[in-house]
Amino acid sequence: MVTSNATHRRKLTMDQFGEFVRRATPKQIAKIHVDQLPESIPESLVDSAPYETRHAIESLIFEANAYQINLAIELEAHFGPAINNALALAKQKGDSRSHLLFKRKVSALVGLFNKSKKDPAILKSESFTEMMLDVRRLLEDLRQESGALAHARHYIEQRLLNSGPKFLTIFKTAIKVLTKRFADIERSMNLFFYVSVMLSANEMNYVRDRIIDLERKSSSIKVRLEEQREQLRRLQGNAITRRTKKHLINELQTSITELIAELSKYEVMVSETDLLAWLDTVVEASMSGYVRKQAGSVVGTARLGLFGLLQKYCMLQEDSALQVARNPFSQIDPKKSIQYMIKSEQFILDYFSNKKSSITAWLGEAAQNRIDSLGVLEKQLMTEMRKNIKRVNKYADSLLQPIRVVHLAAPPSIIEVIAL
């Protein structure tokens, strides 16, 4: 009868066992140990065996199935019901369907991004937008998959010391497989973050250029508006002129209304949704060693662009609340700059609080290292943002200088990245 012991033996793959079945002699069958056999052997494999060994092979497969069932029962008894689920994830050694599709999509995305250097219109095309949406949807699938892998690896690692010689090899092999699959997914995501931060820097550059253009067009209107408001305040503040200059007051009120309507054509908008998306891209890129190595200067430029737009967003929020139609970049009130800084800091703090919660939900107990890295990055960004706001308050015009995004060398192919 075939027996098993604690001694580690090389496990056969399904292809190797199939070849063994076709060529094995009765003596060879008697020597094989059940723990060497692959899992989930199909009964149809017996038909591949020579007639004289079919009964022995059939018995071997039966023992292998019984062995796997008993092993699962024993594992659950020693390490809890989740252990078999964790080990099951390690049985898939190749890329999942979502991962394969993600790599193909990102590879196509890289190709379009490289072509956009000669034809920028590609980045605004419907096909590019749809591809970005597809990749982002697949990214969420990969996050869930990598989270499950991280949970499983952490669960097994916590029980490694108590595994004993019988389960030690099983656990170590599973950890190795889970670690590789997690790293493979992370490399694929890093390539996407690389392209994303390049795109985000370009998007922020476009928005800032748009702000410059709108501010330039609206500046003269704002000056006239303030002059007429001041004139109206003086006329309405005097009891005599309120009666004698009533016609002029009505004209001023009409003119102010018309100027406000004209000014609305040049209204500057900074989307909170866009800000959060850009911040998320900057954070993911900043946490990726691969992206920092390939596009460190662009990551730094994207940070500065983000801080400028974030401050602009907070200033617009405050101006809207106060209903003040003026150019906030033309003159910065020191008291207001403190309020802008507080609002900007709160925006960053709220983001990181939510980000830490989502990472904890994603990676569970395995999230601590990433949360620690996120905490370091949060402090760095806060420090950089405060320095940036102080520079802006001292040199207001520099806030609206266009960001120049320099395209780096063409991103490596998926194959090159996976081979890193």
Image (spheres, grey):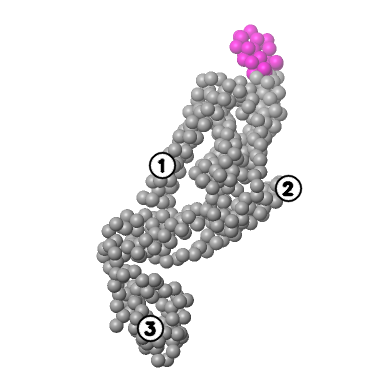
Q: Of the numbered discs in the image, which one, if any, rests on residue 118?
A: 2
- In front: mark 3 or mark 1? 3
Classed neighbour count for the residue bearing mark 2: other residues with Cα under 10 Å, few (<14), some (14–19), many (≥20): few
Q: Secondary structure at mark 3?
A: helix
Of the numbered discs 3 and 1, the one sitting upstream in the chain is 3
Query: What amino acid is labelled 1 in the image?
Result: Asp
* Quadrant of the drawing holding the C terminus: bottom right
Name the quadrant of the N terminus.
Answer: bottom left
In-front residue for pair 254/366: 366
- At label 3, counting other C-alpha atoms closer than 10 Å, the crowd grade (few under 14, some 14-19, many 20 or more) is few
The residues colored magenta run 227-250
Give the farthest residue toward the top. 240
Name the residue beneath numbered marker 1. Answer: 372
Q: Are marks 2 and 1 in contact (CB under 8 Å)?
A: no
Q: In the picture provided, is 30 more to the left or to the right than 226?
A: left
Can you tell which mark lies on residue 253?
A: none
In percent of width and height, residue 269 lies at 61, 35
Amino acid beneath label 2: Lys
Q: Which residue is mark 3?
A: 28
| Labels 2 and 3: the sequence-earlier one | 3
